[in-house]
Amino acid sequence: MLILRFNLAIMPKMDEMKRLCTQVRRDIVRMVHAVNSGHPGGSLGCVEFFVGLYGEVLRYNPEKFTMDGKNEDVFFLSNGHISPVYYSVLAHHGYFPVKELNTFRKLNTRLQGHPTTHEGLPGIRIASGSLGQGMSVAIGAALSKKLNNDTHVVYSLHGDGELQEGQIWEAAMYAAAKKVDNYIATVDYNGRQIDGDVDKVLPLGNLKAKFEAFGWTVLENPEGNNLEQVLATFKQAQTHLGKGKPIMILMKTEMGMGVDFMMGTHKWHGSAPNDEQLKKALDQLPVTLGDY
């Protein structure tokens, strides 16, 4: 039975975490607008997930980042196109200066459109964005921790459209067969992908039943944009660690959350706001921590 501890050194109070959520959303729309490129929709929808994960759930030390992740929890972003939210949260938690967000997608930046590793950016352990691969990497990391008697946990995030990739299901089968029970995966189930609604592009069916049939413990979070619910679901998932099964959280979110004209549509999956749209978005997102 794993004994879990939150990282009290960086754990903000709930109101501070909610202010950070608003600031991260400002960062996202500003980053994408500045280069007229990027993926704001899914990034905005996953803000509470990232703020909760790095603010209270993961056990880590950004000042002692290592690629192997020994003796700390590790996270892998599989749907790497939502890098804006990832970069913003990493910066606000001390992995690199917040002002570096200003270099997003520019020449010679460490903040590529999809996370990469050859630039040596703290917090990033794999290149991601080629969908379907992150679960395999996370399983490998989790097995490595078992072999090294490291009781820390591996986490990952995936898009729902990403589950249309066959490698996901190979990995899901393997994780259950090898009892990878130090691993918590989450699917951002917003129901939309670049070409439209997931149910119209390639329906996923009953995901809970599918993952359970593959041998996973499955939890559902119907309120993925509610920070308290995100944290409660993580805590519930942690109670299943060490019980012989990998753990999946199916998290319902709203693509474009926080910016009214980006919500309810797939059109902002990979589109940047123009000047007028940026102003409209920022008017809905008050400055809470200060812009980079």
Image (cartoon, grey):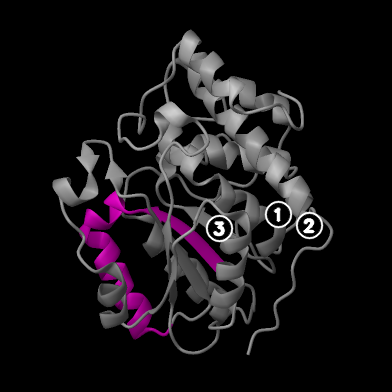
Assign a secondary structure to mark 2.
loop
Q: Are marks 3 and 1 in contact (CB under 8 Å)?
A: no
Q: Is residue 19 visible?
A: yes
Please identify, in this view, whether the residue under mark 3 or under mark 1 is nearer the observer: 1
The kind of residue on which mark 3 rests is Phe
Q: Do the residues labelled 1 and 2 touch (CB within 8 Å)?
A: yes
Q: Name the residue under label 2.
A: 11
For the N terminus, the image quarter is bottom right
Q: What stretch is highlighted in magenta?
A: 154-179
Query: Residue at coordinates 42% horizontally, 45% vertically from top-left?
Result: 254
Query: Residue at coordinates 52% horizontally, 51% vertically from top-left?
Result: 225
Assign a secondary structure to mark 1.
helix
N-terminal label among 2 and 3:
2
Q: Mark 1 points at which residue?
A: 55
Left or right of 218: which side holds 6?
A: right
Q: Name the residue under label 3.
A: 75
The kind of residue on which mark 1 rests is Gly
Compared with residue 141, is residue 182 higher up or lower down, i.e. above or below? below
Q: Number of callouts in the render?
A: 3
Q: Residue 104 carries which label?
A: none
